[in-house]
Image (cartoon, rainbow, N blue to C red):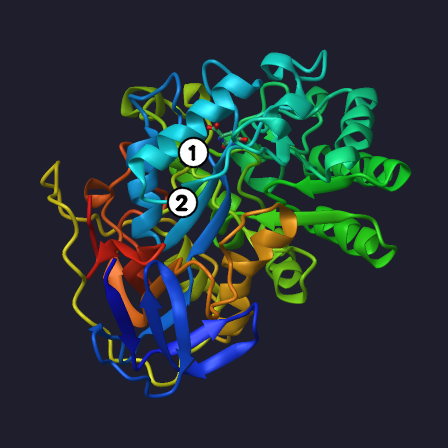
């Protein structure tokens, strides 16, 4: 394998605390050396002047729809979208058809990920058989399988029965796995269409109250405390939930949490358009919740940004609001949404905005719209660049094991890296996404921060903004 020298970039490596100029020499798939002005002899030099070099991004929460809904996404198209977003590792949720609730399915998902070879795929196994919530799935068998599953979730659905969650938290202690819960009290959200508040009242849409999330978060935290098991909370979206996690962490409960880019940037005001692209579960909340989730991310209450990338086929999603399934794309926009919405000024030393990197052919031939979602802007910034990168790379590794990912970028480690331009602006065009689906809530939005290269074990999966396969 070739020798590469990533030269002249700003290396931001949260795992080692490095943030400053450094060259990175890659040899035979691994980082060989990190430091100033490295010797380029025998190496292909990749000019990273004005660019940020960091560990490849890690997404704890994606839906790749394979097996079962390959018309919406496949492990291949989802992996390509991930690589283009700067990711080198993704964790697909088990709500496939069949459900990934046994060793056979999780092994198949992991094997297909390896075959595609664009990102490392770490499957999440279901907590209950068929995600039906009545009996525990064979968690131990999935953990011992070739897929080495160490994270289980019924995501898409909550674990309704406290008894089963307790059992799962107790049982998984034996192999230090984590239970990731989708916190939603189903009895309070039956038929819910959006966040319950002024906007839902105005639109006449059935509401999904913040309390329905917070009650379950409180229950989950109590059970994590009772059992000593490891709990992870998926897509935290309310201020009350952030506060509960903050307090639980303060008293030593073994809990980690993630937030999704859309909950960090959009509000329930978007529903006024009745465009089902803004329908998601948990729903877009109020401005005060967005603010609280941002602050939780900033102070480490929330460990990670996870996309909840949820592709849906057009014929399913582009229907009237009440019948559309919830879910939004995220993989190709997460880094740029984070930089645009949460990180203040462009990084020092960044280049002036560049013309957009050419994407794949525009399959629909439509120019990006001028619309886009109403966003909550943050001119001053909630996170510095290093913290933002931490939440996208190293933070996820606190939530579950993602060996070889999230840094440190140090001699001997696998060269799983992202290189991005923190100042380049581009306009999201759903027709140019690599995902098979189109349901991005950021269509038409101008974002700052563009992935230039992604490397998986030293090989370009994305080069100059183009997927290599
Ligand atoms: O909006 C969502 N979509 N939330 C979930 O929890 C599941 C996901 C999906 O699978 O589409």
Look at the numbered disc 2 and give the secondary structure of its residue: loop
Instruction: Indicate the quadrant containing the C terminus: top left, top right, bottom left or bottom right.
Output: top left
Q: CA distance from mark 1 to mark 2?
A: 8 Å
Q: Indicate whether 266 appears above or below 385.
A: above
Picture quadrant of residue 133: top right
Task: Establish whether ligand 1 lies closer than 8 Å to the Cβ of label 1.
Answer: yes
Q: Report the disc number at residue 310.
A: 1
336 versus 259 height, above or below: below
Instruction: Identify the residue at image location x=77%, y=56%.
Output: 246
User: Which is nearer the eye, 331 or 142?
Assistant: 142
Residue that appears at 67% across and 66% down: 299
Residue 224 in the image, given as x and y percentages of width and height: 82, 39
Which residue carries the number 2 mark? 330
Label number found at residue 244: none
Q: Is residue 464 above or below residue 206?
A: below
Labels 1 and 2 touching (C-beta < 8 A):
yes
Q: Residue at x 67, y 30 (%)?
A: 184
- Residue at the bottom extreme, as displayed: 37
Question: Along the line of sight, which residue is nearer the eye, 48 or 348?
Answer: 48
The answer to whether any part of residue 438 appears in the image is: no
Q: Nearer the viewer, residue 300 or 442?
A: 300
Q: Mark 1: give few (<14), some (14-19) or many (20+) Cα within 10 Å.
A: many
Residue 229 appears anywhere in the view: yes
Q: Quadrant of the N terminus?
A: bottom left
Residue 178 or residue 44, whichever sits in front: 44
Q: Is residue 345 above or below residue 93?
A: below
Question: Dot 2: within a 10 Å radius of its alpha carbon, few (fewer than 14), some, or many (20 or more) residues?
Answer: many
> Which mark sits nearer the N-terminus, 1 or 2?
1
């Amino acid at each position: 394998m070739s020798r590469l020298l990533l030269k002249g970039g700003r290396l931001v490596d949260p795992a080692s605390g490095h943030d400053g100029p450094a060259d990175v020499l890659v040899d035979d798939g691994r980082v060989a050396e990190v430091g100033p002005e490295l010797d380029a002899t025998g190496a292909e030099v990749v000019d990273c002047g004005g660019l940020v070099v960091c560990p490849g991004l890690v997404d704890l929460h994606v839906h790749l729809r394979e097996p079962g809904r390959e018309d919406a996404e496949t492990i291949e198209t989802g992996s390509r979208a991930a690589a283009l977003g700067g990711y080198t590792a993704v964790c697909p949720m088990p709500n496939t058809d069949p459900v990934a609730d046994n060793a056979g399915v999780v092994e198949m998902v992991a094997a297909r990920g390896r075959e595609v070879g664009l990102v490392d795929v770490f499957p999440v196994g279901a907590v209950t058989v068929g995600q039906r919530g009545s009996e525990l799935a064979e968690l131990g068998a999935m953990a011992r399988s070739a897929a080495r599953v160490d994270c289980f979730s019924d995501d898409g659905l909550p674990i309704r029965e406290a008894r089963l969650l307790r059992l799962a938290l107790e049982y998984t202690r034996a192999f230090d796995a984590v239970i990731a819960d989708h916190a939603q009290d189903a009895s309070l959200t039956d038929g819910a269409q959006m966040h319950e508040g002024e906007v839902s009242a105005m639109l006449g849409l059935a509401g999904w109250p913040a309390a329905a999330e917070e009650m379950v978060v409180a229950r989950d935290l109590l059970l994590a405390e009772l059992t000593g098991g490891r709990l992870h909370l998926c897509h935290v979206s309310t201020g009350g939930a952030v506060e509960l996690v903050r307090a639980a962490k303060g008293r030593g409960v073994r809990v980690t949490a993630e937030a999704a880019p859309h909950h960090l940037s959009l509000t329930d005001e978007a529903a006024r358009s009745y465009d089902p692209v803004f329908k998601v579960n948990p729903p877009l909340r109020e401005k005060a919740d967005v603010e609280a989730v941002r602050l939780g991310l900033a102070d480490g209450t929330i460990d990670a940004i996870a996309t909840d990338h949820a592709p849906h086929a057009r014929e399913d999603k582009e229907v009237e609001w009440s019948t559309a399934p919830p879910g939004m794309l995220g993989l190709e926009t997460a880094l740029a949404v984070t930089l645009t919405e949460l990180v203040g000024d462009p990084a020092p030393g960044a280049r002036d905005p560049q013309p957009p990197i050419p994407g794949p052919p525009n399959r629909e031939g439509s120019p990006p719209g001028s619309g886009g979602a109403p966003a909550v802007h943050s001119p001053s910034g909630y996170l510095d660049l290093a913290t933002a990168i931490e939440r996208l790379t190293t933070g996820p590794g606190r939530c579950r094991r993602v060996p070889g990912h999230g840094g440190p970028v140090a001699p001997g480690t696998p060269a799983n890296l992202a290189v991005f331009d923190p100042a380049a602006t581009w306009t999201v065009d759903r027709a140019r996404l690599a995902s098979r689906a189109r349901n991005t809530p950021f269509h038409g939005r101008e974002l700052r921060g563009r992935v230039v290269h992604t490397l998986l074990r030293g090989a370009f999966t994305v080069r100059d903004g183009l997927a290599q396969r």
